[in-house]
Image (cartoon, helix red, strand yellow):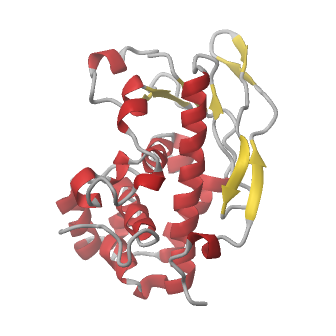
Amino acid sequence: MKFSTNKSMIFATIATSALAAPFIYDNNSTTELASSLSQEVLGWTHATFPAIYQTCNETNTRMLNAAFKDTAEVTAYAKNRLLDYGIDDAHYKRWFGNGSIFTVMGVFDQLMEASKGGMLMRCDDADGLCAANPNYYAGYHRESASAETVICDYFYSSRKPLSTICFEGTIVDVGPTHYAGIDMLHRYLHLPTMNMDEYIGEYAETLEEVIDYAQNNATFAVKNVDNYLYYVADVYSTSVIPGGCLGEL
């Protein structure tokens, strides 16, 4: 099948996905969580999403739901690229070298369709790290509550929708986590249930290290968070500009 850069042709399946019914989360007290995401999601039949805690206001919730949808879209596009071009694709070789395509595809399936029961996005600065790192921390994984992610105020002002990709500089210039949906993918991978107890981890974070992994250590390229972030951004950008907008490596 010829892979098209027209997104409307790529996603033949548009599924309406909703979070499961509200569930009970126990953190020294019993609190009911609201499940607010109910919208069209591109490319996944059974996409799942974290719950959003009651400390997130209406604007927070709207922006988080938009980021969840962007995450689903960018990962669906990446998986379709894998299916259409396989390991001979220049984009695949750039970020994963000769690493196992089965691992890469499995990671995308795990991130988007595995159960997220118990996962929680909260907007209160529970551990004070947002305040301690203003204009730097967009969010953090809570070590004391392994299923919880705090989203800082900086996330909402600094992370952009996927629709702006290629219009604010190259991916190399701005970094893949400049985009909220890709940054959310990064935040998923901080959680033990999503990273398979650190089977996927942040082993290398600089662009030079990420490229070196793909060229010289493909076993770790397919296990490194930032290789995935650059891959999905690089591939998705081809839907906006022929050849994409990766920039100079």
Q: Position of residue 22 (x, y in %)?
A: 78, 28
On screen, residue 243 above or below 123: below
Residue 63 appears in which quarter of the rendering?
top right
**Nearer the observer, 62 or 225:** 62
The residue furthest front is 167
Q: Is residue 105 visible?
A: no
On screen, residue 39 above or below 155: below
Residue sitting at x 68%, y 61% = 44
Q: Position of residue 193 (x, y in %)?
A: 57, 43
On screen, residue 196 above or below 99: above
Residue sitting at x 44%, y 83% = 87
The residue furthest top is 29
Q: Quadrant of the N terminus?
A: bottom right
Does residue 158 appear to the left or right of 77 in the view shown?
A: left
Q: Is residue 140 visible?
A: yes
Residue 97 appears in which quarter of the rendering?
bottom left
**Nearer the observer, 171 or 128:** 171
| Total labels drawn | 0
Residue sitting at x 74%, y 40% = 19
Q: Position of residue 151 (x, y in %)?
A: 46, 28
Does residue 152 appear to the left or right of 214 in the view shown?
A: right
Q: Quadrant of the C terminus?
A: bottom left
Q: Position of residue 163 (x, y in %)?
A: 47, 54
